[in-house]
Image (tube, helix red, strand yellow):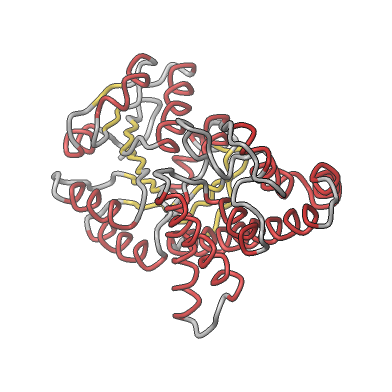
Amino acid sequence: MAFTNDLQLGWIGLGSMGFAMATNIQTYLSQSNQLPLHYTNRTLSRGNLLKEDGGVPCQSVRELVQKSDVVFISVSDDEALTTVVKEILDSGTIKDKIFVDTTTAHPNTTTTVTSQFTSADASYIAAPVFGATPLAQAGQLLISVAGPAPAISTITPFLQGVLARAVINVGPDPSKALLLKTTSNFITAGLMYLLSEAHTLTEKADLPASVLESLIEQNFGAYAHGVSKRLTSGSYYPAEGQAPSSGLELGIKDIGHGLSVAEERGMKLEVGELSMRAMVEAKSYGDERGKRLDSSSVFGVVRKWAGLEFETGVVRERDGVREKVGQ
């Protein structure tokens, strides 16, 4: 297939991250006078705003795949990815098409999917993203890519400066991009846990959170500061009607992948296991209250383990909860 400016892009999956990325792609296509983005989603009305921006809805995965040269996939987990891949493979010939998968899946799942697409004479690029929904909306994600070099060259103009601030090329093996993503998730979970303990310690020792947060920003950089703000702002325990910036369920899934990869290689991720324990307890706490919590809600669990309330004073004041005597 000879790729030109008439390259037709398609997008499967419009969750919070997928919708933000698809919107940025469509904006770029419109501004550069290229063909509009085709999209599909289990609930197609999720793309109504994308349609208003010029996107073209497709009623099924089959329709979208057969009309597109490059197809982006953005779904929630391995099970959803497996289902979508089956629909793609059943849609008809996909010879010479390029599939760009932003899903955070287990590296083993990626290996299986790569084999399926390669057997169908299609190119498969794993392109997991680093960052939560606000970064996706701003087009400031970090993306790692791995797969056939010619296919990566074809899609790069739609990544850097459109979806991402930077792109890391991991090489020809798609599973390695997911290994990098899994490792990154482990680091992030460990940082969340570490900062949760630090903020809990300073609260119990009567050191203002703002002072610790200033140190974090000045000494450990913007990323650590961003994680800290998720704790101190109360985002770890979203307000009523507010969606988490990074869902706890996905965090549990991601850390589970890391623990699995480590076990397969004969080692333990003890920090990962500690983070998983706190995440699972946080999910139970949220479920009991009918709330979807953020992946940073390990903060509330660390606070409970230290004898404090799950909710900080900032959260209680925001939600109009009267503080208990002595708190």
Frontmost residue, 270 versus 135:
270
Residue 320 spot, x, y in % from top left? 58, 31
119 left or right, relative to 292: left
Residue 200 spot, x, y in % from top left? 72, 56
Residue 126 spot, x, y in % from top left? 42, 53
Frontmost residue, 262 versus 91:
262
29 left or right, relative to 275: left
- For the N terminus, give its image quadrant: top left
Q: Residue at x 32, y 25 (%)?
A: 47
Q: Residue at x 35, y 43 (%)?
A: 73
Q: How many marks?
A: 0
* Residue 318 quadrant: top right
Frontmost residue, 226 versus 12:
226
Residue lying furthest bottom in this view? Answer: 266
Look at the picture and state if 119 lies above or below 323: below
Q: Residue at x 56, y 34 (%)?
A: 134
Look at the picture and state if 119 lies above or below 158: below
Residue 27 spot, x, y in % from top left? 46, 21
Frontmost residue, 234 versus 60:
234
165 left or right, relative to 204: left
Q: Residue at x 78, y 48 (%)?
A: 221
